[in-house]
Amino acid sequence: MNTYGRYPVRLVRGSGARAWDDTGKEYLDFISGIAVNTLGHAHPALVRAISEQAQTMLHCSNLFHIPAQEKLAEKLTRLAGIERAFFCNSGAEANEAAIKLMRKYWYDQHSPRRTIITATRSFHGRTLNTLTATGQDKVKTGFDPLPPGFIHVPLGNMNALKQAVGDDTAGILLEPVQGEGGVNVVADAYLRGVRKLCNDTGILMVLDEVQTGVGRTGEMFGFEHTGMRPDILTLAKGLGGGVPIGAMLASESVAASFGPGTHGCTFGGNPLSCTAALTVIDVIEQEGLLENARTQGGHLLLGLKAIQRTHPVMQEIRGQGLLIGAELSCDVAETIARCRESGLLLLPAGPKVLRFLPPLNVTSAEIDEALTILGDCLGTDYIGTDGGSS
């Protein structure tokens, strides 16, 4: 079905931060499958792990105990300091599970709390619940009637958030960095304020780290920058390094509301996906990729700021770790096309923001190469799609 605005490229293989199309053309891949290819393409450890697992067992029903799933749950809960894990296949599924768990938790408390507060410009998925939770009207058009129980407030406005909390509020759902919404970094102080508000009112705090989790921001989880932790955490994208997997972590007291039969997933936590996720986490730790994400993210930010000084079309640069956005004064579509033609793959975060998502093991040389291509594509002869020259 015609559900994707596809680029005119057929990628057929990759290695590290590079990919090749069916004509043999080489690209620097700073999309990484939209923050999925944490270790780049065809990392030897990941290739070996999933190959060996495929020779043993691909899938096992959750009617049985699955050793790789138990090991992954132990590792994630230990790293996050959140006691329980549920596994699924995607970010939307993880957020859907979080929404269900919030409401079931309050049901078990004999409370009427069901409403979930999210932020404008947020993105939480494309199921009916998660697109309704999303703070962007463009994903909702044509899918009414939408499920009730969601309200949106401006990101970063604590007064508006406090006013939105009422007797029917179940929890607050936020992204530490809004990826699809424009690479909008949420201030640490604001997130700490949200945690305090949830503590004071007794409601639940949920962080959607589908894009920011698993090292993307330079810490294993984005919330680690703030010194606090949520009641519920959702993960996906980079967790499997390219193999589909999602996870929802929850505190012991909240997770207790999910008992046998309350939620489930046929493919969630299968041996192959859990083995992939375990390998991704092991490689991040063994190869020092959190530090690399911080170092190379800083290098990329400095390089973009250098381009900004000579290219006024680039107006604002923001991000954390290796999730970085550069806002232009014009639509980014032409810039993305020019970069692609020159061998650099980028994607938008809204109509005027370039998004940079290289793998966590990207090198300084690869970032320098990408910056050179971008600078050339933003040359003085550049004419934006809105007709404004730079």
Image (cartoon, grey):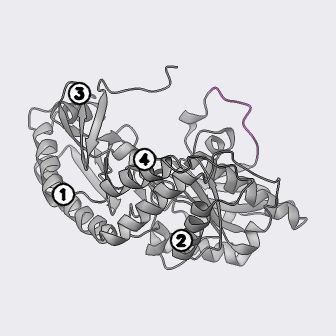
- Answer with mark 3 or mark 1, whichever residue precedes in sequence: 1
**Circle 4 residue:** 242
Q: Amino acid at mark 1?
A: Lys
Percent position of residue 277, x then y: 48, 58
SS assignment for the magenta stretch, majority: loop
**Circle 2 residue:** 75
**Circle 1 residue:** 305
User: Is residue 25 visible in the rendered structure shown here?
Assistant: yes
Estimate the spatial distance between the alpha carbons at disc 4 and disc 3, rounded to whole Å: 38 Å
Q: Residues within 10 Å of mark 3 (few under 14, many from 20)?
A: few
Estimate the spatial distance between the alpha carbons at disc 3 and disc 1, rounded to whole Å: 24 Å
Percent position of residue 1, x then y: 52, 19
User: Measured along the vertical axis of the image, is residue 80 above or below residue 182?
Assistant: below
Q: Amino acid at mark 3?
A: Gly
- Element type at mark 3: loop
- Element type at mark 2: helix
Estimate the spatial distance between the alpha carbons at disc 4 and disc 1, rounded to whole Å: 31 Å
Report the magenta residues as a range: 142-148
Q: Residue at x 57, y 44 (%)?
A: 125
- Of circles 4 and 3, the one toward us is 4
Q: Residue furthest front?
A: 55
Q: Amino acid at mark 4?
A: Gly
**Circle 3 residue:** 387
